[in-house]
């Protein structure tokens, strides 16, 4: 492939404690990323606070989330004949909630906006419900778009003939209400990110700059948005001669713009506040997620997958094995039910022992992200998976290792 020949033209140079010299357009990235982040922040921050508070109150009172889960589980027997794996019988429920209820709710808000005018309160409530308690709806749509993208070239979620109609339902319909453009998971993520594994040709790689920096995270937002809008994806596919993939990805962006244009013709303010804003909240969250998944590099072995991908044991707010990111990269196409057995096999073999891996336990990915950009190395070390301190390392020694791995960057020099 063209990509393989191009990759061989470069040698990798490891830097410690400095951004790679090939980390280009730093000021421009900072301005663009900062503009995106701080434009969304006044609405984004209270939205996240509210969805976190919603979960807290729900658990202390009616426990509604669990009741909804129980009701959904009672319906799964009706869906099993239509899915390829019995464990996926919950997916039609998610399609009904996220792919029918949320769009109908959006249409109701469109009607109310046109008829009675724009309302900040209604807008806030809509996005709160769209994201869900503790951003659970966002987590489901992201995860199912992700899984669907990986399953497209294999079997998909559904049996035939349902497969013909719903094989891309999350990426080409539901995702539109969550800022997911067609092509990001179906082509870019599977054909670029997983092909180059955070390397030089990975269009949203984290390797070229130190990750323990909020400023560098702001720069990364600009990189992520070029991917999220399919811009860098199309450019990369064209550069590597994959014109068919470039065209299909570009069609995804065109389709998304047509989708927005239909709403804009009815109400510009509704389109910006209800349909465009999800590009901001979802992709800020997703950029934090990927920034954390690939935050560490071992300077002694830059190809060590167990360091290069973050793993979270006994994780909070994770679903369908997404917390086992090493397994996901090693076996991206396997069904999600296989992730735990594969992880447990590697765990028993000692691959996740401290400090041989980037493994944490009993926490949330966004807490890890906060400690990373906040340079709270000892707090990170406290979360590391190291039962009964089998590593015999002190907290400061663990923190020093983590800091070094966060500050290791890779420069790709043309030879």
Image (spheres, grey):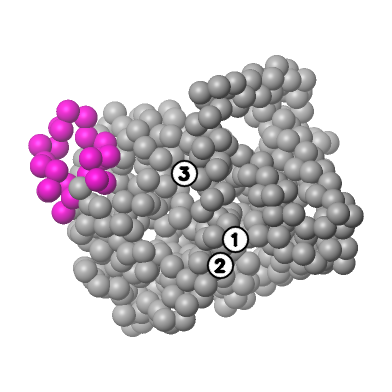
Q: Residue at x 23, y 52 (%)?
A: 377
Above or below residue 192? Residue 313 is above
Secondary element at tag 3:
helix
Query: Upstream in the sequence, badge 3 or badge 2?
Result: 2
Q: Residue at x 76, y 50 (%)?
A: 173
Where, by quadrant of the figure, is residue 182 drawn? bottom right
Mark carried by residue 280: 1
Mark 3 neighbour density, 10 Å: few (under 14) some (14–19) many (20 or more): many
Above or below residue 42? Residue 85 is above
Mark carried by residue 328: 3
Above or below residue 167? Residue 258 is below
Q: Position of residue 110 (x, y in %)?
A: 83, 53
Highlighted range, magenta: 379-400
Mark 3 and mark 1 in contact? Answer it, CB < 8 Å: no
Q: Identify the residue under disc 2.
A: 39
Q: Residue at x 53, y 33 (%)?
A: 55
Whether residue 222 is visible: no
């Amino acid at each position: 492939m063209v990509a393989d020949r191009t990759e061989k033209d470069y040698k990798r140079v490891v830097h410690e404690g400095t951004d790679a010299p090939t980390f280009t357009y730093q000021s421009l990235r900072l301005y663009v990323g900062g503009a995106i982040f701080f434009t969304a922040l006044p609405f984004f921050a209270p939205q996240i606070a509210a969805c976190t508070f919603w979960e807290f109150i729900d658990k202390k009172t009616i426990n509604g989330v669990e009741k909804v889960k129980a009701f959904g589980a009672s319906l799964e027997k009706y869906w099993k004949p239509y899915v390829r794996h019995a464990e996926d019988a919950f997916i039609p429920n998610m399609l009904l909630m996220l792919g029918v209820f949320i769009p109908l709710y959006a249409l109701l808000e469109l009607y109310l906006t046109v008829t009675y005018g724009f309302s900040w309160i209604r807008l806030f409530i809509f996005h709160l419900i769209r994201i869900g308690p503790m951003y659970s709806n966002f987590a489901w749509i992201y995860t199912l778009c992700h899984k669907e993208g990986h399953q497209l070239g294999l079997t998909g979620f559904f049996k035939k003939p349902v497969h013909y109609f719903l094989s891309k339902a999350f990426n080409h319909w539901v995702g539109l209400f969550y800022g997911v453009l067609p092509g990001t998971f179906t082509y870019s993520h599977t054909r670029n990110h997983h092909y180059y594994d955070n390397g030089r040709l990975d269009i949203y790689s984290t390797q070229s700059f130190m990750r323990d920096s909020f400023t560098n995270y702001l720069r990364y937002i600009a990189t992520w948005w070029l991917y999220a809008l399919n811009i860098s994806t199309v450019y990369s596919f064209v550069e590597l001669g994959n014109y068919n993939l470039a065209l299909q990805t570009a069609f995804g962006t065109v389709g998304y713009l047509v989708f927005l244009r239909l709403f804009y013709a009815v109400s510009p303010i509704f389109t910006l506040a209800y349909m465009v804003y999800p590009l901001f909240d979802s992709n800020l969250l997703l950029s934090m997620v990927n920034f954390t998944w690939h935050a560490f590099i071992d300077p002694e072995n830059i190809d060590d997958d167990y360091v290069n991908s973050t793993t979270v044991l006994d994780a909070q707010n994770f679903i369908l094995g997404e917390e086992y990111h090493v397994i996901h990269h090693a076996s991206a196409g396997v069904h999600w039910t296989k992730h735990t057995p594969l992880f447990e096999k590697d765990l028993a073999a000692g691959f996740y022992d401290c400090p041989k891996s980037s493994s944490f336990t009993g926490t949330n990915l966004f807490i890890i992200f906060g400690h990373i950009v906040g340079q709270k190395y000892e707090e990170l070390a406290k979360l590391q998976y190291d039962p009964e301190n089998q590593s015999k390392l002190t907290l400061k020694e663990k923190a020093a290792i983590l800091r070094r791995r966060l500050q290791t960057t890779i420069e790709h020099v043309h030879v």
